[in-house]
Image (cartoon, rainbow, N blue to C red):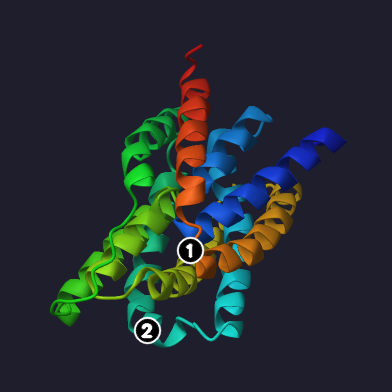
Amino acid sequence: MEFHPWGIAFLLATGFAAGIVNTLAGAGSLLTVPVLVLLGVPADIANGTNRVGILAHNVIASWRFHAEGIGGLRHAFSLLVPMMSGSIIGAYTISLLPAAAFQRAFAVLMLVLVVPIVVGAQPRTQGPAWPRSLSAMVFFFVGLFGGAFQAGVGLLLIAALSHAGHNLLRANSIKVVLNAVQTAAALTIFVLRDQVWWLPGVMLAVGYGIGGVVGVRLAIAGGERLVRWFLAAMVVVLATRLLGWH
């Protein structure tokens, strides 16, 4: 499939906005997947293609957090295996769904996520840590959801990590590491299932990467709330388009 220059510019801009959103809170895929579909990419392939940008974003954001002295790898290490395992199962299962069915399911998911997008995760800095077995189970299911849909997995990670006692900044640094690993696992499945279109994926990756760098700076400056209402409004508009409402 060929993209006109305006389509490429649109993908770059959307990736940039989603990169900022993903770093600050999560759910940037609620922008990028519908835009891919509106540009003519089948919904199931849009789901796989989007992971190219997501992977680039999380790798770059992880590097930027580390450069700022807030690396999350040490805290993420014990959670990587359950996240990857869940992601592989989720990605393979969703890859079997017809494009039209996935599009409807994704649109409904978008509307469901509007409230948590606006409210955001409330950090909890006190309280006992989860037992290791419970933590592994929670992050397995987060990986399962991330492998299937990706959209909103950042919100789930922030909520889980905050519950485990990390403040919002530290939770964000751990989140991007976990997301990079589970996205790499899911992307492998979508590539093997021939559900990735590389040109739009690379365009998104460029935008996501630049947005991730800007997002880290905003996260450190405490700018999370600036993007929530914008994202919620765009999610409602795009979801109604996917559902065919006018």
Q: Residue 155 in the image: state x and y as whole percent.
A: 37, 55
Q: Is residue 199 left or right of residue 33?
A: right
**Residue 94 to residue 191: above or below:** above
**Residue 160 to residue 121: above or below:** below
Which numbered mark, 2 or 1, is in the foreground of this view?
Answer: 1
Q: Residue 198 in the image: state x and y as whole percent.
A: 72, 51
Please name the residue shown 49% across and 16% down the image. Answer: 244
Q: Are marks 2 and 1 in contact (CB under 8 Å)?
A: no
Q: Is residue 184 left or right of residue 113?
A: right
Count neighbours of disc 1 (C-alpha within 10 A) and say few if under 14, some if 14 to 19, many if 20 or more.
few
Q: Is residue 110 left or right of residue 65?
A: left
Tag 1 residue: 222
Please name the residue shown 58% across and 50% down the image. Answer: 18
Q: Quadrant of residue 4?
A: top right
Query: Which element carries disc 2, helix, strand or loop?
Result: helix
Count neighbours of disc 2 (C-alpha within 10 A) and say few if under 14, some if 14 to 19, many if 20 or more.
some
Q: Residue furthest front?
A: 221
**Residue 65 to residue 46: above or below:** below
Label 2 – label 1 distance at C-alpha: 22 Å
Q: Residue 36 in the image: state x and y as whole percent.
A: 63, 37
Tag 2 residue: 75
Q: Nearer the viewer, residue 214 or 203?
A: 214
How many marks are shown on the rendered structure? 2
